[in-house]
Image: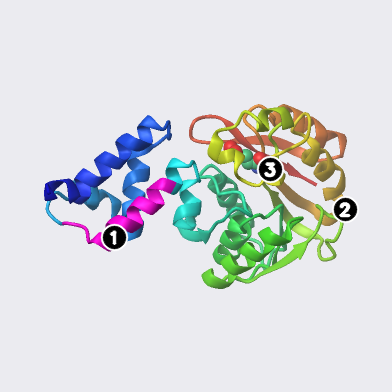
Amino acid sequence: MNTDALTPRALILAQARRFEAAGIPDPLTDAAALLAHVTGKHALSLRLDTDSRLSAAALHEYETLCRRRLDREPLQWILGTQSFMGYDFEVCMDVLIPRPETELLAEHAIARLQDLPAPRVLDLCCGSGCIAVSVALALPGAPVTGSDLSAEALAVAARNAMRLGAQVRFVRSDLFTDIDSGPFDLIVSNPPYIPSAVCETLQEEVRREPMMALDGGPDGLYFYRRIAKEAPSHLTSGGRLLMETGHDQHAAVAALLAENGFREIHPLYDYAGIPRITEAVC
Ligand code: GLN
């Protein structure tokens, strides 16, 4: 047997070729991340390792995980976590996997609250809890509430808060229906915003994620419409609303906010110059 084929580097390259042939978007990254998960070693050093050999048990486990990925299971479900704002969040089929671009939303929320004593914060549609937990960890004195319609998502969010040591109150609510605390100094939200028809065309991995976290109704604006209307009665005067918006939705969301009396409505851009967030003051 050619044992050179069992070095981490050779294994990763072989798996990456299988992934690539199956149309998996980032074959090399995924092949290395899965081996890192199995061995507890760093992905980059494994990619360069032409010396060590893997045990039979490790090889078997790697093969099992790679088969799941070949079946287009999202990488983060297999790993069980996704990093967000420097913290590892548990993820599973009950929550949307936190996206890197949403870190911008958490960063802006934290920046806006930095100088307020004990600001009250609500994260609507909190999913895994990544925004609520990151805000609570950055602002330990702030009462933070996270809400979601999905009881399963709230269970994941509560585990994330507990494991990361964040104080967050979680409430099951259809947007504001069961929100009884407040008024809030800031409401932050990454609601579902993908138009229903587009949901069917998404990448295979994304289509496995909970549709209720992605589907924003026929025009993608269903949740913004409701939030724009209902948020003012849950915000302090001068309170802020920060919402992630789809790449082409800022103008439509801004119009909804203006109709409902918000002021200082403006987009915040990501590093690629895309308007990612719509901000407004009540
Ligand atoms: N940005 C997410 C995606 O690309 C969508 C998140 C949402 O609907 N809030 O799939």
| For marks 2 and 3 on the same chain, the one whose residue lies earlier in the sequence | 3
Q: What percent of the width, then of the height, locates residue 276?
A: 60, 36
Residue range of the region highlighted in magenta in the rendering: 53-67
CA–CA distance in space, label 2 to label 3: 28 Å
Q: Which picture quadrant has residue 154?
A: bottom right
Residue at the spot of label 1: 58
Residue drawn at x 20%, y 46% as measured from the top left = 9
2 and 3 marks in contact (CB < 8 Å): no
Choose between 269 and 48: the one closer to the eye.
48
Three-letter code for the amino acid on which mark 3 is drawn: Met
CA–CA distance in space, label 2 to label 1: 56 Å
Three-letter code for the amino acid on which mark 2 is drawn: Ser
Residue drawn at x 80%, y 47% as measured from the top left = 282
Choose between 183 and 263: the one closer to the eye.
183
Residue at the spot of label 3: 211
Q: Which numbered disc covers residue 93?
A: none
Does label 2 point to a residue whose CB lies under 8 Å from ligand 1? no
CA–CA distance in space, label 3 to label 1: 34 Å
